[in-house]
Image: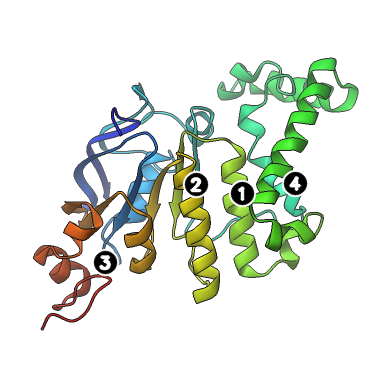
Amino acid sequence: MSGQLLEVVNLERHFEGLKAVDGISFIVAPSEVVSIIGPNGSGKTTTLNLVTGTIPANGGTISLDGLRIDHGDTARIAEHGVARTFQNGRVFATLSVADNIEVGIHSTLRASRPFRSLSHLFLLRWISLLGELFVAIVGTPGSRRERVQIDATVQEEIRRFETRLGPRRDDPAYSLSYANRRRTEIARALALKPQLLVLDEPTAGMNQSETVEVLEQLLELKAEGQAILLVEHKLDLVMKVSDRIIVMDGGRIIAEGPPEVVRRDPAVIEAYLGHRRVPGGKDTA
């Protein structure tokens, strides 16, 4: 792996004097899986929120493939190729599985979103909305061709989770199990064809067998060359899927490196678990 897909430099975020993220810097290379671990409150999810534009930074820079994105909103950052899932799963409960996945494609559309460049301008975004409404009602040759591509992409992502989501394609999301809602959310993020996939605890609430399924799917994505920035508490999964691990504590990075190095770092053992246990290994005390 060479080059830098994501570059974070001196990133900061404060909440009423609390330094949730305190001047951290790291990179994610193309096709690399980088995981962020650390105790609760260490700044992991805040870091993901900053990278994806959910909240603004107080300082530092974030670049994607050489383009500054730290002043962009979530929609623009998605258009640049960053897709994410959330710690608490977010699906549209009354929409079907297929429609939920289709939502993830919205920012990539061209023919179905005339005047899309105006959608980011508050006073002019109504022009873009009217254009989308017109195309939805009347249709154009371009939008019809795009419709075929949309259907193919939705089917491709359902096929990725075929056993679980295939039979539920047309079912409303509220009828799904928690694990299948999480799978739907991941499929929606992948429908964007992102340069960088950002996952915030994708196996939260899953049992052991469900977690193993997600691990296998993450390993498949890794083999396909998908760059991933992952926050996950299940250390066995982290150790198996990651190329590098970043360890945070108190808003700072206290260790970084390959899994086999990080899991034996004394600072990590102390900060992350509070006693002499190797992450993913046996007691050393």
Q: CA distance from mark 2 to mark 3?
A: 27 Å
Q: From the viewer's perspective, is residue 128 above or below residue 150?
A: above
Look at label 4 and name its amino acid: Asp
Q: CA distance from mark 1 to mark 4?
A: 11 Å
At a point 66% along the width and 33% down the height, the residue shown is 106
Verify CB contact (< 8 Å) between mark 2 and mark 1: no
Residue matched to label 3: 39
Look at label 2 and name its amino acid: Leu
Q: Earlier in the sequence, mark 1 or mark 4?
A: 4
Residue matched to label 1: 187
Look at the image and tell me in which quarter the C terminus lies: bottom left
Per the image, label 1 sits on a secondary structure element best described as helix
Look at the image and tell me in which quarter the N terminus lies: top left
Q: From the viewer's perspective, is residue 74 above or below residue 173?
A: above
Q: CA distance from mark 2 to mark 1?
A: 12 Å
Verify CB contact (< 8 Å) between mark 3 and mark 4: no
Q: Earlier in the sequence, mark 2 or mark 1?
A: 1
Q: Earlier in the sequence, mark 2 or mark 3?
A: 3
User: In front: mark 2 or mark 3?
Assistant: 2
Q: Earlier in the sequence, mark 1 or mark 3?
A: 3
The answer to which of 255 and 131 lies nearer the viewer is: 255
| Most distant residue in the front direction | 223
> Would residue 113 be visible to someone looking at this image?
yes
Verify CB contact (< 8 Å) between mark 1 and mark 3: no
Residue matched to label 2: 221
Residue 30 lies, in percent from the top left, at 37, 34
